[in-house]
Amino acid sequence: MTLVVVITIMSAVFLVLGLAALHLLKLYKLQSARILALQNQLAALCEGASGTDERILRFEQTLSKIRDHQHAIDLTANSQPAYDHAIRLARKGAGIEQLIDNCNLSDEEAHLINRLHGRESGAGMH
């Protein structure tokens, strides 16, 4: 009888081990499917991020061009003669040579501002 008991116990142990192995196999298959799904999602995200990087790069290049253009406009605006300052000087009675020297005006510009805004033109009455 002890042999029958040993065989029964061993059969029960093998049955439990077999059931545990089946359970582990199912769990392995389920986790493998989850890992594959996550890998696919990650690949899709990486592909989308790659497109986003290209769009950001193009945006940054466009922004750089706009900055350069704005800088060129600012330089041009700053290099133009200071007409407002010249008009104020002419109204205070500054001469043509003073307008040319102080405001970086051409002779023609200084004469025109002096005629329009100088004290002798009567512009002080405006």
Image: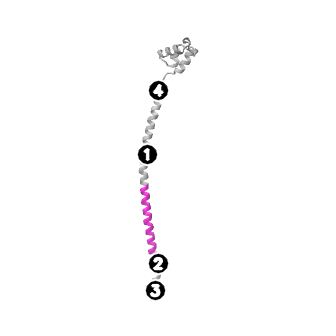
Q: Which mark is residue 13?
A: 2
Residue contact between numbered discs 1 and 3, judged by CB atoms under 8 Å: no
Q: Is residue 9 magenta?
A: no
Q: Reading the chain from its start, which is encountered first: label 2 or label 1?
A: 2
Q: Reading the chain from its start, which is encountered first: label 1 or label 4?
A: 1
Whole-angstrom CA distance, mark 3 to mark 2, is 14 Å
- Which amino acid, mark 4? Thr
- Which amino acid, mark 1? Asp
Residue contact between numbered discs 4 and 3, judged by CB atoms under 8 Å: no
Whole-angstrom CA distance, mark 1 to mark 3, is 72 Å
- Which amino acid, mark 2? Val
Locate residue 18, reporting x and y percent: 44, 75
Residue bounds of the magenta highlight? 12-41
Q: Reading the chain from its start, which is encountered first: label 1 or label 3?
A: 3
* SS label for mark 3: helix
Label 3, residues with CA under 10 Å away: few <14, some 14-19, many ≥20: few
Q: Which mark is residue 53?
A: 1
Q: Reading the chain from its start, which is encountered first: label 4 or label 3?
A: 3
Locate residue 106, reporting x and y percent: 47, 17
Above or below, 37 against 119 in this view is below
Residue at label 3?
A: 4
Q: Residue at x 45, y 35 (%)?
A: 66
Q: Residue at x 54, y 20 (%)?
A: 85
